[in-house]
Image: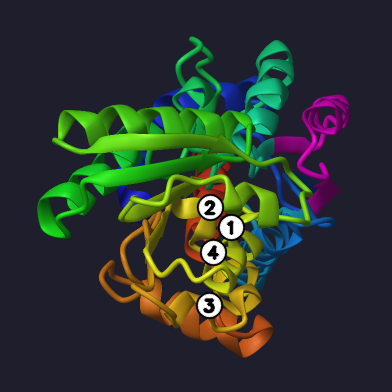
Amino acid sequence: MVIRWLSFLPVILALAVSATPARAQLAGQTVAIAVAGPQSGSGAVLGTEQKQAVEMAVDEKNANGGLLGAKVFLVSADDRADAAEGKAVAQRFCDDPQVLGVVGHVNSGVSIEASSVYGACRLAMVTAMSSNPGVTERGLDNVFRLTNRDDNKGPAIARYLVRTLGKKRAVVVDDQTVYGRGLADLFAQAFARAGGEVVTRAKVTVGQKDFQPTVAALAKDFDVLFFAGIAEAAPLLKEMRAQGLGQRFACGDGCWDVKGFIARTDGAATQGEGVLILSAAPAVGRVPGSAEFAARYQAKYGPIANYAVNSYDSARLVLLAIETAARR
């Protein structure tokens, strides 16, 4: 998976060079990369798996002699899926001269705010998850992503629902975050272009617990509900099924999470017409090396739930960029 991103290395290398003296003698020294995401709260499943995968990349690098003889250590921070906290975390990473690159953040809104801080201090950031187009559309040459963009994902799932599954009347619900609102808008536009009709646009809030009024207010004649968000997907689906609504539940990659979504539905995901979830990467095994990584990850942490492969490759890319820069 890293191979697809090697064309971006020259820019990352320029950033790494700014922090790493050319032809540096690193033997016996220590260097650091950082990882940031939610490690508490409703998004902790995503942030924890990201951190574990990055830890694996660092541990494997050190087991193979380190980075040109230097030991790599990992600096980790919990941004709590909060934009203000993400900016504070980014500033701490910027202020640490040993940190040469960042894997993160998770939530698009947090990544957008944090990346402005990284841009000011010329610190490279690679996000394995943030998919809002605004993450990489603001002219910051230090910001990269290893996941697809919402302006590809929203239209793709909309076209599939209309053209392949024959869905014509959609309810669209978002969680009012930068990620959720943006994905919902892109989906709704594409669904209409494909020949469908959005009969209801509804909103939930992050942290919401009671979805009975939300579901009760939905139009009764829809044939698919598309949800753009993360943690509220499971309770929303459970409430749909509790109220006897068996229509297809579709969701973006915010639901691409065995622990955070499928397990939390308590069986509702297999009721009615079931669910359609857009994945953020090829299935494990389709890309050379991914199955072997998955086996190593599972042996250490248990089955992959979501973005471990993306996060691992993001960390390897950052490490490769630093090493290549140090050789120059």
Residue appearing at x 63%, y 48% in the figure: 214
Q: Is residue 256 left or right of residue 326?
A: left
Q: Which sits in the foreground, 145 or 262?
A: 262
Residue appearing at x 22%, y 52% in the figure: 161
Mark 4: amino acid: Met
Which label's residue is closer to the chain start, 3 or 1? 1
Looking at the image, do the residues carrying marks 4 and 3 touch, with CB atoms under 8 Å apart? yes
What x and y, as percent, mark residue 267? 55, 84
For residue 268, which numbered disc appears in the image?
3
Q: Nearer the viewer, mark 3 or mark 2?
A: 3
Task: State the colouring used for the structure image.
Answer: rainbow
Determine the secondary structure under disc 2.
helix
The residue that label 2 is drawn on is: 254
Which label's residue is closer to the chain start, 2 or 4? 4
| Magenta highlight range | 74-100
Mark 3: amino acid: Ala
Q: Is residue 78 magenta?
A: yes
- Quarter occupied by residue 257: bottom right
Determine the secondary structure under disc 3.
helix
Determine the secondary structure under disc 1.
helix
Q: CA distance from mark 2 to mark 4?
A: 18 Å
For residue 240, which numbered disc appears in the image?
4
For residue 233, which numbered disc appears in the image?
1
Q: CA distance from mark 4 to mark 1?
A: 11 Å
Q: Residues within 10 Å of mark 4 (few under 14, many from 20)?
A: many
Q: Is residue 247 magenta?
A: no
In this rendering, the answer to whether 129 lies above or below 126 is: below
For residue 184, which numbered disc appears in the image?
none
Mark 2: amino acid: Gly
Mark 1: amino acid: Ala
Looking at the image, do the residues carrying marks 1 and 2 touch, with CB atoms under 8 Å apart? yes
Q: Nearer the viewer, mark 4 or mark 3?
A: 4
